[in-house]
Amino acid sequence: MPKCIIDGREVEFKPGEKIIEVAKRVGSVIPYFCYHPGLTVVAQCRMCAVEIEKMPKLQTACSTPATEGMVIHTKSPKTLQNQKATMEFLLINHPLDCPICDKSGECDLQDYSFDHGDAYSRYTEERRTYLDLDMGPVIKKNMNRCIHCTRCIRFGSEIAGIHEMVAVKRGNYTEITTIDGLPLQTGYAGNYADICPTGSLGLKDFRFKKRVWFLKKTPSVCEGCSTGCNLEIHQEDNVIYRCVPRENLEINRYWLCDEGRFNFNYLHDKDRIIHPTLFQDGAGQVSEWKEAFNLSKKTLAVQKTVILVGSDLTQEEGRLLQQFLPEHFPKADVYHFGTPGISSSAQDDSEDQILKRKSKTSNLHGFEKLGFKSFPGFPKGCQAVLVIRGGRAILPDLKGIPAVGLGVFSQSQASSFVAVLPGTAFAEKDGTVMNYQGVEQKLRQAILPPGQCKVLSEILMMWTHQKSSFGAA
Ligand code: SF4
Ligand code: SF4
Ligand code: FES
């Protein structure tokens, strides 16, 4: 392997590797704005410029490949002076917005201003300001904070596959906007907020809700489809405020789709059933667990029962059910369900050639591997159905058959049910899911279940030990 010297240390690098990547690997911090490992390199902010021996001028570390014997100084007086000058330039029009900016606490501009900038500015002119056009339901734009790094423009054309962000006007008047001022079209708009190094593009869903330094972070996996994008759940006091992508170069690289990013909102939906509930004529009534078990067992104590198990459950839950169901419902037909029209992994293609898959549950492939059969429709004479789901699997038409729900349901979904035994959703439990590539990944519990919701193993244990007034189911 060729070697170069960074800040006096001999470092090996792969041919073609850029200085910024080599330096990062060995812990030499080079500040940057326009560079992003998932986007093309444009070398336009000049923040990453470093001194290289035998070169008369500073070179941008994001675009300059390391070469054999190269001697690089990331902390030399010339390098530091450039960083100060670049920060002064970028901040001449930047408002003193940090106290009310959602990016505050995780803003590259704020951090680099503190670490590499100067406390003084020579700028005395009036600052440039913009009127902000709406950018659609996902992103709130604040152009006063923009430093024209163009990451957003490159994300649109290179990753989202839609050239919707553009820079208009020139020089001091440059402005980032959408073509013809249209709302953003991509289903990946949340990534604009992640990659923007300032608070210019923020998530509307997160706006003014929580200062980022209060958030506790749990690494987990998206349950929105069979891709299984890696994400981080950010919560405080048992409330999830946002999900952000976690880098995984084999699966989602640096990105999340909006469907997966905002999927967590149903966990806190006021409509979610979080207590054992009995239904009569579509109206739900909170009950004790005992009554809900009694009515469920009575409903399911018939000759012909179908059990539908959502492929949004984990492998552990699937295995548990494979032990529990034959013992308690020896005559019942058991099937998996999840996405209308996608009954097997063979039908689970890419939905958009970016990340999304057609299966809208995370564990279709795992459930097939466990041996669950797909739901072919209700057999003639079916008298009762037990639906077990994690919250994502899309309910089929129950055709008026008396049904019991176990897991995560909303009032509107369950109004045709007889009883619901409330369970846990993806962020409220640990478990394993298998994505479409056959990769097994871990869901991690980030928050406690609300109300009286319980994990599946606990509900099944209660079911087993609960003495029924109607005899064994
Ligand atoms: S809006 Fe953000 S990402 Fe886009 S150019 Fe401005 S600072 Fe960069
Ligand atoms: S592509 Fe699928 S797994 Fe990835 S974020 Fe979107 S819904 Fe979630
Ligand atoms: S990060 Fe290298 S020039 Fe912007």
Image (spheres, grey):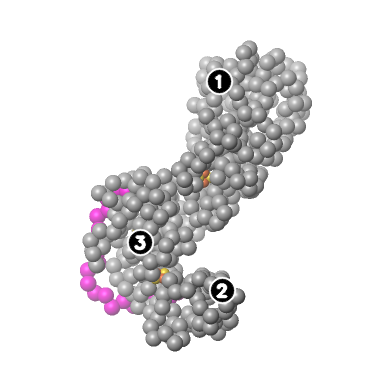
Amino acid carrying mark 3 in the image: Thr
The magenta-colored residue range is 112-135
- Residue to which mark 1 is pinned: 398
- Residue to which mark 3 is pinned: 150
In percent of the image, x 44 and y 87: which residue is there? Answer: 54
- Residue 238 lies in the magenta-colored region: no
Q: Helix, strand or loop at disc 2?
A: loop
Q: How far is the residue under mark 2 from the one under mark 3? A: 28 Å
Viewer-nearest residue: 383 or 283:
383
In percent of the image, x 54 and y 27: which residue is there? Answer: 395
The percent position of residue 328, horizontal first and vertical second, equals 75, 24
In percent of the image, x 53 and y 22: which residue is there? Answer: 397
Q: Is residue 422 visible?
A: no
Among the two numbered marks 1 and 3 on one chain, the one whose residue lies closer to the N terminus: 3
Among the two numbered marks 2 and 3 on one chain, the one whose residue lies closer to the N terminus: 2
Specify whether 201 is left or right of 297: left
Dividing the image into 4 quarters, which one contains the C terminus? top right
- Residue to which mark 2 is pinned: 13
In percent of the image, x 46 and y 53: which residue is there? Answer: 210
